[in-house]
Amino acid sequence: MSEDNGDADNPAPVNGRIKQNKRGYGDFFSWPVNRQLEEWAIVDSLKESLEKANAVFFNALVVRGRGNDPPDCEAVLLDGGKLGIEVTELVDAEAIQAHKNGNTGHRAEWNRHKLIKAINARLKVKDIAKNIKGGPYDQYILVIHTGEPVLNYDFTFPLVSNHFFQYFNVIDRAFLLMSYDEKYRCCPFIELNIKTSKG
């Protein structure tokens, strides 16, 4: 995978495009110049945080590339199985629009109901077996990343930790990954509770 860095002695072109394409809200994980690199970096951030928590379960992460998704990435499970990894974003569309309209001080408000509803929406959209390319996968996970200013670990964990999301046909595990937090010195994550059967 290659990254467009502009001229080695003059990185301004790429920096200019990044600045131009940044939406200015909730875009901690955004890398507008290279979407594939962005997806790889998001999953790698999760892997680093899993390692910090002694909970890592995969390695050999690769991006599948445009036209070969979903899933966005593949990896090897520590037991040797094949892992499919899909990446999606959780962000408040109204807050983005407010920023585009010049209201740069606006921050979306979040509560338990709104957050669980938004997570459910992302899970359902990505749980469509006929869309999946590649595989077969021994395990399939969804990484939901968010740069929402309010959704840090300390605020978010109590809202979702006791909630059980419905059984899904494709998604075996799902993680909510938050922006870098100086308190934890990583991008904190929460593994969502997903029912393992339809019952």
Image (cartoon, helix red, strand yellow):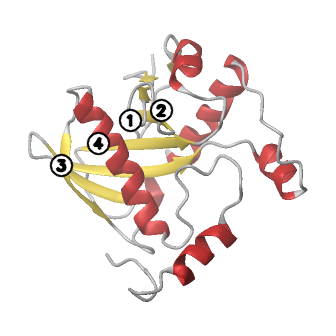
Q: Nearer the viewer, mark 2 or mark 4?
A: 2
The reply to whether the C-beta atoms of the residues labelled 3 and 4 are less than 8 Å apart is yes
The reply to whether the C-beta atoms of the residues labelled 2 and 3 are less than 8 Å apart is no
Q: Quadrant of the C terminus?
A: top left
Mark 4 = which residue?
47
Question: Considering only order in the chain, which callout, 4 or 3, is on the residue closer to the N terminus?
Answer: 4
Question: Considering only order in the chain, which callout, 2 or 1, is on the residue closer to the N terminus?
Answer: 2
The reply to whether the C-beta atoms of the residues labelled 1 and 3 are less than 8 Å apart is no
Secondary structure under the numbered disc 3 in the rendered image: strand
Quote the CA–CA distance across marks 2 and 3.
Answer: 24 Å
Q: Which amino acid is tagged 4? A: Lys
Quote the CA–CA distance across marks 1 and 3.
Answer: 18 Å
Quote the CA–CA distance across marks 3 and 4.
Answer: 8 Å
Question: Considering only order in the chain, which callout, 3 or 1, is on the residue closer to the N terminus?
Answer: 3
Q: Is residue 102 above or below residue 116?
A: below
Q: Which amino acid is tagged 1? A: Cys
Which disc, if any, is residue 181? 2
